[in-house]
Image (tube, rainbow, N blue to C red):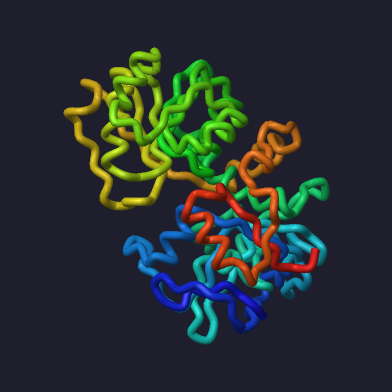
């Protein structure tokens, strides 16, 4: 089968890969589509030390697949089910991070495993069968929305809050979308001006150019100050420490982005007198049902994030260059025949 493999730091190519090996609790799936991630995927390609990448490895974690075969002890899925987060288990020296850009992969039946007394470990609830009215292309957004909604919900957000978001990538847009759906009073984004229209579509009320030398002063002159919550969807010390001065005294700051993961520092001298640093993590599974409901209500719209063109697996190297250059927010790669 074909897969997008990072052969070494900075070198991605499409090549043949061994077929996934099923276990008795696994479902074999044809992977139909997988979306790009400008954060994790690019860091894996670039060999970010935090991820401790072992090469060669198959890329991709925002996949949607169709079950074609089930193991002898599978109870929760059946052939034909459309499922989230199809992955690949390393085989014959080929690693996986997480293997969504491959023609075939697996999902485990966690409920059946728990029933049998087996440990699940990290990731319970990520592999779910989707309702029949969910389009597979739209489904590639579910991973981003589940992660960010779970993370956002744990911050103690309340309707009427003033939210400042650092970063205008897919995650920043998703946090703005969740804040708007939750009834935020203000949603201000600091990001790339090319993303301003997209930001406004998901509910951003004011947009600031991250390149502005007088960012804080400009914000304050426009009355954009005293935020209850600052979400850093980039994960870099310098822009975070510029923006933190816009928090209200007693506000909350949280870091979701991974650009400098493990190395982001906050300069207290640039922050309010008191503030809370919050990091409660996320659990995709806990947000799944809410994401599906908001998709059906039209409150989470894939078209606000995904490029109109669907790309083929053979062109994935060029696609990631466009993602790197910020010409695309998220691209969908067609892998299966559907």
* Residue 96 in the figure: left or right of residue 217: right
x 21%, y 28%: residue: 270
Quarter of the image for the C terminus: give it. Answer: bottom right
* x then y, percent, for residue 178: 56, 32
Q: Residue furthest bottom?
A: 92
Q: Quadrant of residue 27?
A: bottom right
**The quadrant where residue 84 appears:** bottom right
- Percent x, y of residue 274: 24, 22
State the residue at coordinates (41%, 60%): 43
The image position of residue 136, as x and y in percent, is 74, 54
User: Foreground: 174 or 120?
Assistant: 174
Observer-nearest residue: 78 or 179? 179
Residue 16 versus residue 120 in the image, above or below? below
Residue 310, given in percent of the width and then of the height, sits at: 70, 57
The image quadrant where one finds the N terminus is bottom right
Which residue is drawn at the image coordinates 58% and 50% (left, top)?
330
Q: Is residue 259 above or below residue 44?
A: above
Say how many tags the image has: 0
Point 59% across, 66% down: residue:
316
Q: Nearer the viewer, residue 170 or 100?
A: 170
Q: Is residue 211 visible?
A: yes
Q: Is residue 164 above or below residue 15?
A: above
Q: Is residue 115 visible?
A: no
């Amino acid at each position: 089968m074909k897969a997008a493999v990072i052969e070494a730091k900075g070198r991605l190519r499409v090549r043949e890969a061994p077929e996934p090996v099923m276990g008795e609790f696994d479902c074999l799936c044809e992977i139909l589509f997988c979306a790009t991630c400008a954060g994790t995927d690019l860091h894996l390609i670039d060999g970010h030390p935090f991820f401790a990448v072992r090469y060669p490895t198959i890329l991709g974690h925002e996949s949607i697949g169709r079950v074609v075969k089930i193991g002898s002890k599978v109870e929760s899925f059946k052939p034909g089910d459309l499922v989230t987060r199809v992955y690949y288990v390393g085989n014959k020296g080929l690693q996986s991070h997480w293997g969504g850009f491959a023609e075939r992969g697996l999902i485990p039946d966690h409920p059946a495993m728990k029933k049998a007394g087996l440990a699940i470990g990290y990731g319970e609830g990520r592999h779910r069968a989707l309702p029949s009215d969910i389009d597979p292309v739209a489904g590639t957004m579910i991973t981003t929305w589940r992660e960010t909604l779970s993370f956002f919900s744990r911050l103690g957000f309340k309707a009427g809050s003033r939210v400042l978001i650092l970063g205008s990538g897919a995650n920043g847009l998703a946090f703005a979308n969740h804040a708007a759906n939750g009834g935020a009073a203000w949603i201000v984004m600091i990001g790339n001006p090319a993303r301003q229209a997209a930001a406004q579509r998901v509910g951003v009320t004011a947009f600031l150019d991250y390149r502005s030398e007088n960012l804080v002063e400009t914000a304050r002159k426009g009355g954009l100050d005293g935020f209850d919550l600052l979400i850093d969807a980039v994960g870099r010390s310098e822009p975070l420490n510029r923006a933190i001065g816009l928090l209200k005294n007693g506000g909350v700051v949280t870091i979701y982005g991974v650009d400098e993961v493990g190395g982001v520092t906050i300069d207290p001298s640039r922050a309010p007198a008191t503030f809370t640093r919050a990091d409660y993590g996320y659990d995709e599974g806990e947000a799944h049902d809410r994401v599906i409901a908001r998709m059906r209500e039209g409150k989470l719209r894939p078209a606000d994030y995904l490029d109109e063109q669907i790309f083929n697996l053979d062109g994935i190297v060029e696609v990631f260059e466009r993602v790197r250059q910020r010409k695309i927010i998220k691209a969908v790669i067609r892998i299966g025949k559907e």
